Image (cartoon, rainbow, N blue to C red):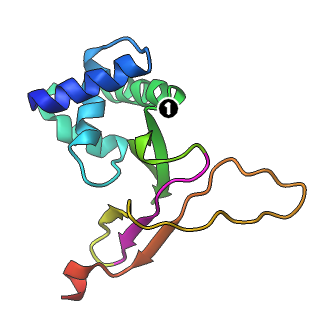
Amino acid sequence: MNTTVKQHAVALLRQKRLRVTAPRVAVIAAILQSDSPLTQQQIAAQLGDQSPNKTTIYRTLLSLINADVVHRAFVQQRQWHFELAHHCSPIQCHPHFTCIRCHRTECLHDVSYPLVDLPKGMTMYRQQIRIEGICSACSA
């Protein structure tokens, strides 16, 4: 694991006043090193031989979600995809683009969109947008 990535992971944990543990640092580092949201299985695969077991990864993700370090970006094929929460406001996150050919998902950090005006009586928790289409690599 890259020392800079590890230091960033430790800094995120300390900023949220969470105990610095090897599984938390490893999970955050895996997410930091990815340019798109990851599933629990992708996190385990990225960690390789150093990976904690599935239950530890799951519990680690839950603790990081509860501390607002990580959030569930979207569900695809019945699997949650996770990313760092620092790119999002409490009620609105950046949109994601998923290619229908290669199934790769990209974060669209520089794309903004308006908040939906909900009917009276409804309360928004979080607005998330996922766009499906064909990516530039697949359309070339």
Residue 48 location (% of width, % of height): 15, 35
Q: Which residue is mark 1?
A: 68
Q: Position of residue 82 (x, y in %)?
A: 40, 44
Q: In the orientation shown, which residue stands out farthest toward the top?
A: 19
Q: Residue furthest right?
A: 121
- Is residue 97 inside the magenta stretch? yes
Q: Residue at x 50, y 25 (%)?
A: 67
Q: Which residues are magenta?
A: 91-100
Is 1 placed left or right of 92 in the picture? Answer: left
Residue 38 visible, this orientation:
yes
The image shows a total of numbered marks equal to 1
Residue 78 seen by the camera: no
Q: Which residue is rendered at x = 43% and y = 14% of the image?
A: 17
- Residue 69 in picture, x, y percent from top left: 43, 32
Q: Is residue 114 left or right of residue 88?
A: right
Q: Does residue 108 show up magenta in the picture?
A: no
Quarter of the image where the N terminus is located: top left
The amino acid at mark 1 is Asp
